[in-house]
Amino acid sequence: MKRKIFITLTMVLAFGMGLMAQNLKTEKVKVYGNCGSCEKRIDKAAKSVDGVTKANWDKETSMLEVTYDPAKTNLEKIQTAVTKVGHDTDAMKADDKTYSSLPKCCQYERPKK
Ligand SMILES: [Cu+2]
């Protein structure tokens, strides 16, 4: 009897988690940067946002692919986190001071706007 309840609970839990996984959103956003250290910095910043489950910036395309729970966060918050560590996006700009404090190799060409 106890075993049956346990199995039922496990199934309900697995089903619930499946539903949650379906609600995750994956989107791509342009983030300016140069090199491997930028990649680490950008990924780390994006992953630090509550609700983000996956973040991967590609230095070839400058595109950040993020998977997140839209109930917890949104692209705006993610972009804010990324600009806070010095990387511009098309929608938001990093603080000039933060940008200047990046290592030389990371000082990408900033988008004009
Ligand atoms: Cu870099």
Image (cartoon, rainbow, N blue to C red):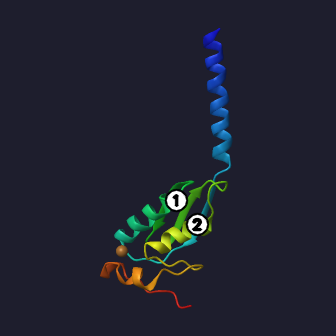
Residue tagged 1? 49
Residue tagged 2? 77
Q: In the rendered image, which quarter contains the N terminus?
A: top right
In the image: residue 83, left or right of residue 14: left
Residue 15 location (% of width, % of height): 67, 34
- Relative vertical location of residue 9 with respect to residue 111 in this rendering, above or below: above
User: Mark 2 near mark 1, Cβ–Cβ under 8 Å?
Assistant: yes
Q: In the rendered image, which quarter contains the C terminus?
A: bottom right
Which label's residue is closer to the chain start, 2 or 1?
Answer: 1
Mark 2 beta carbon near ligand 1 (under 8 Å): no
Amino acid under label 2? Lys
Label 2 neighbourhood size at 10 Å, few (<14), some (14-19), many (20+)? some
Alpha carbons under labels 2 and 1: distance apart: 8 Å
Kind of element beneath mark 1: loop
Residue 45 location (% of width, % of height): 45, 64
Residue 5 location (% of width, % of height): 65, 16
